[in-house]
Image (cartoon, rainbow, N blue to C red):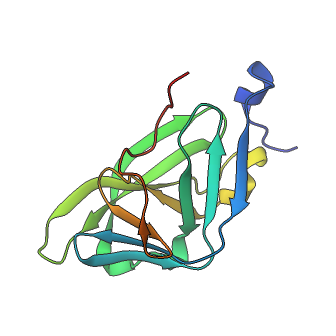
Amino acid sequence: MRNPAPGFEKHPNYRVDITPLTGTLIVKAGTRIIAESENAVEVTETRHRPVWYVPVTDLAQEAIRATATETYCPFKGNASYWSALTDSGEEITDAIWAYLAPYDECADIANYASFYTDKLDLFIDGELVNKDGPGWTDP
């Protein structure tokens, strides 16, 4: 590996599983479609609620705005953020993130974006997913 994740060395039993999603994923900010994809993946991570990612090319570019926010994950790498814009012009800050150049173990989500489901509405085949948002599950 050229760019291994340091987190897996310290926590060898930690898992980040990336699975293709069958069906259509749609993300909305109010009534405005932010993303629509048939190429989404589900990411399940040790002790985290599942999250869904779509290729950044499936984001509605006119409905998002890059922010200066960055975060770091020792398993996935550095994340970049975008705000979502509603039809009424409201900006939902840092509602979308992506690992544009993740660590090798998570290379399958390079140039894929994910969403805070507590800020945006995410539907899989028309069904609204949990609004708790990403984060830790109870032990």
Q: Quadrant of the N terminus?
A: top right
Q: Position of residue 113 (x, y in %)?
A: 51, 61
Q: Nearer the viewer, residue 66 or 13?
A: 13
The relative height of residue 19 versus residue 139 in the rendered view (above or below) is below
Q: Position of residue 94 (x, y in %)?
A: 32, 52
- Up-down: is 97 above or below 76? below
Q: Is residue 59 left or right of residue 42?
A: left
Q: Quadrant of residue 110?
A: bottom right
Residue 121 as seen in the image, left or right of residue 11:
left
- Residue 114 to residue 23: above or below: above
Number of numbered callouts drawn:
0
Residue farthest to the left?
A: 88
Give the residue furthest to the right.
1
Of 114 and 124, the residue lying toward us: 124
Query: Could you tell me residue 48's position as x and y percent?
Result: 56, 36
In-image side of 100 versus 3 (left or right): left
Residue, x 51% and y 31% (percent of image)?
A: 137
Extreme residue toward the front, this view: 127
Quarter of the image holding residue 4? top right
Work out whether residue 137 or residue 78 is closer to the camera in this orientation and state it: 137
* Residue depicted at 73% across the width and 36% down the height: 15
x, y percent for residue 139? 56, 21
